[in-house]
Structures are given as structure tokens and as C-alpha cells.
Amino acid sequence: MVKLRSKTMWIVAIDVRSRREGRDLRKVGFYDPIKNQTYLNISVILYFLEQGAQPTGTVQDISKKAGVFMELSHNQQTKFN
């Protein structure tokens, strides 16, 4: 779920059934460690996680810092209450 482009890492959703260098389903954010910038499209990330997407370790760490998993558990509780 991470592609490198110079110093910026694009966070993308891919289909695991495609080749490793397969086409992205959708770009969902980026992380630039040099500039310490992060952008995450949380609603799209939540959609893919709810559909069963499995983040890589790096993406999981970035998402945790942004509170994505708290949003996911809140959304799931809302759906079932």
C-alpha cells in the first residue's frame, strides 16, 4: 500500500490479486518524512478498511498516528447501535 516517489510516499489502495507493481485502485494519501507532512483521505481509507483492506505496517503506523483506527471503531459502533 506504499509507493515511493522521491522522498514522498504515496499511500494507495491496491488489489492483492494483481501483480506487485499493479495499478492503484485509488490514491488515499501521502507521507513526506523530510517535510514531516501527511495527508490522508480518511473517509476513503475507512471505506477500504471496512471492505477488508489490510494496511502494511508502515501505513498502519501512519494511520494510527492520524487516529484512523479510532474513526473505524467509532463507525462500526455507530452502524451496529
Image: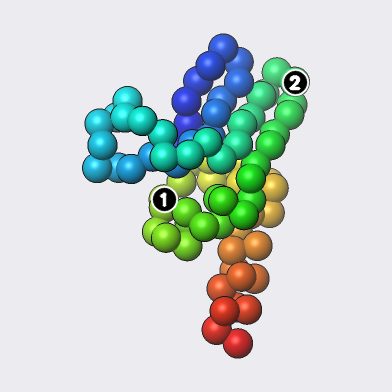
User: Circle 2 sits on which residue?
Assistant: 35
Picture layout, residue 34 above or below residue 54: above
Along the line of sight, the residue nearer the viewer: 13 or 68 = 13
Tag 1 residue = 54
- Residue 27 percent across, percent down from the top left: 52, 36
**Whole-percent x, y for residue 62 in the image:** 61, 41
Direction top: furthest residue: 6
Q: Which quadrant is the C terminus positioned in?
A: bottom right
Other residues around mark 2 within 10 Å, as few (<14) / some (14–19) / many (≥20): few
Residue at 55% x, 84% y: name it: 80
For label 2, the SS is loop
Residue at image x 47%, y 62%?
A: 50
User: Is residue 58 something that shows in the picture?
Assistant: no
Label 1, label 2: how many angstroms apart (C-alpha)? Answer: 27 Å
Say which amino acid is labelled 2.
Lys
Q: Residues within 10 Å of mark 1 (few under 14, many from 20)?
A: some
Quadrant for the N terminus, please.
Answer: top left
